Amino acid sequence: MGIDMNCVQLLLRAKKNGASFERMATLGRQWLRPNRSELIRALLDAGCDISPASEQKLRDPAEIYADEFLHVLGAKQVTAIDANAFEGAQVVHDMNRPLPDSLDSAFDVVLDGGTLEHVFDFPTALRNTMRMVKPGGLFISCTMANNFAGHGFYQFSPELFHRVLCKDNGYSIESCIIWEDIQNSKFYDFPDPDSLNSRVQITSRSGTYLFVQAKRTGNLSPDFVPQQSDYVKNWKAASSSQISNGGSAWKSALRENILRSLRETKMFRQLLHRNIYRRLQLSRNKFKFLMPLEDLRVKL
């Protein structure tokens, strides 16, 4: 768990766009990983007010946690929540378990800096996190997408967050950004596949991170279950076809079975895989679904 220079850039971007960090919770106590001189320069460039005492703490190599950085962002209270108190968490709670009512709607920002991928019961942990955000507040996650197998229990598809953090479940995504762990690479805005009527599939040559920022706009639905957007549209289309065409949907199913048989031949799969790898590398972005953020570059 920790805040690196790329997460710093995106948190400063959120602050510039009006995010309030006044009352914060972090999942786990966050380490502060950037070079401290570079961090202070970025804070000053972003217009943050750094007192001499804060600067001294930020430059102190013994200050390994991110609390002071979060205070500079505007946090008056930072509450770390962890399953164990070994790193000084103020609240000890296992996120595999339902959230206590005392933490409901308690924070302006809840920051996941790399914890949710380590929690086995991810749906419960995510619901807990969403509940902790007060209406109008933000859930922010900096987590893993591609090429981190073995780091935690999970790697995440951006569509997961687009489907969960939605209007029907009391949220609205403000930013969904991915980047490769390569110096000077670009950050890319990851659009909602539902708005494109297409899956947004990517491959990457290195580890790929995912940053999600979502505003709580209403109440969470206790019965809400997310479904992948293209399946929902296929189900609706199939239902409509059956109603309008009598039982003719079997023809579409037959065509699909024939195409599936062709796609499963060895020669077709080899050709397909070669082409997919060439065109879906994140850095190539052939279909232009991912829009680069020109004002930010990846830093290591």
Image (cartoon, rainbow, N blue to C red):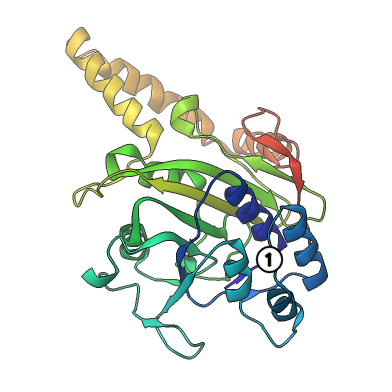
**Which residue is more in the foreground, 289 or 238?**
289
Can residue 60 be seen from the camera position used here? yes
Q: Residues within 10 Å of mark 1 (few under 14, many from 20)?
A: many
Secondary structure type for disc 1:
loop
Residue 272 position within the rendered picture, expressed as x and y whole percent measured from the top left? 63, 34
**Which residue is more in the foreground, 262 or 96?**
96
Residue marked by disc 1: 4
Residue found 75% across the figure and 41% down from its top: 295
Outermost residue to the top: 245
Quadrant of the image for the C terminus?
bottom right
Left or right of 62, for residue 240: left
Q: How many marks?
A: 1
- Up-down: is 87 above or below 222? below
In terms of image quadrants, where is residue 61?
bottom right
Residue found 71% across the figure and 88% down from its top: 62
Residue found 63% across the figure and 69% down from its top: 69
**Which residue is more in the foreground, 8 or 95?**
8
Quadrant of the image for the N terminus?
bottom right
Outermost residue to the bottom: 86
- Up-down: is 206 above or below 162? below
Residue found 51% across the figure and 46% down from its top: 158
Residue 28 position within the rendered picture, expressed as x and y whole percent measured from the top left? 48, 76
- Up-down: is 97 above or below 290? below
Q: Amino acid at mark 1?
A: Asp
Left or right of 45, for residue 143: left
In terms of image quadrants, where is residue 182?
bottom right
Left or right of 92, for residue 199: right
Residue 183 position within the rendered picture, expressed as x and y whole percent measured from the top left? 81, 56
Residue 201 position within the rendered picture, expressed as x and y whole percent measured from the top left? 57, 39
Can residue 100 be seen from the camera position used here? no
